[in-house]
Image: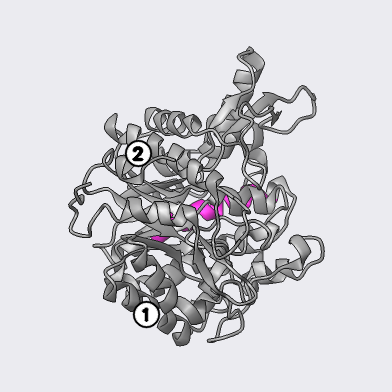
Amino acid sequence: MTDPLHLARQFPADFLFGVATAAFQIEGATKEGGRKASIWDAFCNMPGRVHARHNGDIACDHYHRFEQDLDLIKEMGVEAYRFSIAWPRIIPDGTGRINEAGLDFYDRLLDGMKARGIKAYATLYHWDLPLALMGDGGWTARSTAYAFQRYAQVVMARLGDRLDSVATFNEPWCSVWLSHLYGVHAPGERSMEAALAAMHYTNLAHGLGIETIRDAAPNVPAGLVLNAHSVIPGTQEPEDRAAAERAFDFHNGAFFDPVFRGEYPPSLVAALGDRMPPVEEGDLAVISQKLDWWGLNYYTPMRVLADPNEDATFPAMRPAPFVSDRITDIGWEIHAPAMASLIEDLYRRYDLPVCYVTENGACDNTELVDGKVEDDMRLEYYADHLAVVADLVKAGYPIKGYFAWSLMDNFEWAEGYRMRFGLVYVDYETQQRTIKKSGNWYSALASAFSSSGEQDPA
């Protein structure tokens, strides 16, 4: 087992270690405090969408147990907490009336973090769109981008004074492609036209959100969290290398290019431009406003081969076999070097600001036995990937922090509660929390860094 204190010494003294969660995955209390339904509440109630029709009604009951959970973060010696704010709690219908009880909850959460010396890294949108907005088309409607702008203004005006950082969106790849093209996530669309509309209006909402954050809380560093894909050709044949480049443009460029270059990838526009919604004058200038930071969520590489079918839709690719025989319990290949090559490639292609690894972790379904969870696979995953991050920092890449996904086991979207990503085990019957072996290891690593910014001697 990698010695956490030895690994800690590989990081600079001001490196930030945190843990991450998301509102719908942990809060529960979906019908309390004035909250109304999100698209995920509806999706969970549709047969065949979520494993065993699991839902977020109770989840980890964080809405009622947040003080206990903040104590847990403090006990683990973790300096920062990345969490999301639930739009349906703040403006339950997406537009119109503001729900003071929802803002009150996040007031209490933030005050609890400040009282414990935990830094607050908020995400404004982690997929829980107010269901009422689907009446106008949800993310396929331009009006939703402006609804998001108002929501961002309300949140930042009320909570911005206690935030250490804010992200507009978490993983737009998921809320665009996975949700509107592949149908795996809410709202479950399977339409390229719907996905392309969601892509542009999500990007526009991000830009409008950045404008609003700068206006309402100019001192809060603002960024965007992207689950960039490490796209690797399955062979070095020209057709597979070309497929990998198309896949990069589709899966990464659809978000990186407008945000960091002020344009959509030419290959994507050439192939799909006639199916995109109108990109109005000024849209790309709004989308490409300078960010203070960006966040990378990384779990597994994407290996691709060319799709030989003449009718294949852009990016005309298919999955290639894994190279590593190590996989997580959700079926994802473990290959830490891909994380390094991804970050190197992104900084080569784009003029990027400082980076935080905002999610990284592994699904390890090891169960609780005699009061312990011996999740060695997850621990090794963290050790391997943190070693990669340390090497990148040494090489001069501006990575400023790392957030483990996740603080605790939770609702894993379409997989329901059968997949466990937590450093902390949650018994969903009793809501008892138990720190796992990986959690104790990460705690030892994080505790080597004091809140004063000085690394404790080890």
Q: Secondary structure at mark 2?
A: loop
Front label number (2 vs 1)? 1
Quick check: is 113 in the magenta stretch? no
**Residue located at (44% from left, 72% from top):** 69
Residue 299 placement (x, y as % from top left)? 53, 43
Q: Secondary structure at mark 1?
A: helix
Give the residue at the far front of this rendering. 370
**Residue located at (65% from left, 28% from top):** 304
Residue 80 placement (x, y as % from top left)? 34, 60
Q: Amino acid at mark 2?
A: Leu
In the picture shown, does residue 253 fall above or below 441? Answer: above
Q: Which numbered tag is attached to residue 147?
A: none
Most prominent secondary structure in the magenta stretch?
helix
Quick check: is 195 in the magenta stretch? yes
Q: Which residue is mark 2?
A: 352
Q: Is residue 434 left or right of residue 164?
A: right
In the picture shown, does residue 289 fall above or below 422? Answer: above
Give the residue at the far top of this rendering. 237
Q: CA distance from mark 2 to mark 1?
A: 32 Å
Q: Which residues are magenta?
A: 194-209
Q: Quadrant of the N terminus?
A: top left
Residue 93 placement (x, y as % from top left)? 58, 78
- Marked residue nearer the N-terminal end (2 or 1): 1
Q: Quadrant of residue 384?
A: top left
Of residues 78 and 34, which is closer to you in this image?
78
In the picture shown, does residue 289 fall above or below 47? Answer: above
Q: Which numbered tag is attached to residue 107?
A: 1
Q: Residues within 10 Å of mark 2 (few under 14, many from 20)?
A: some
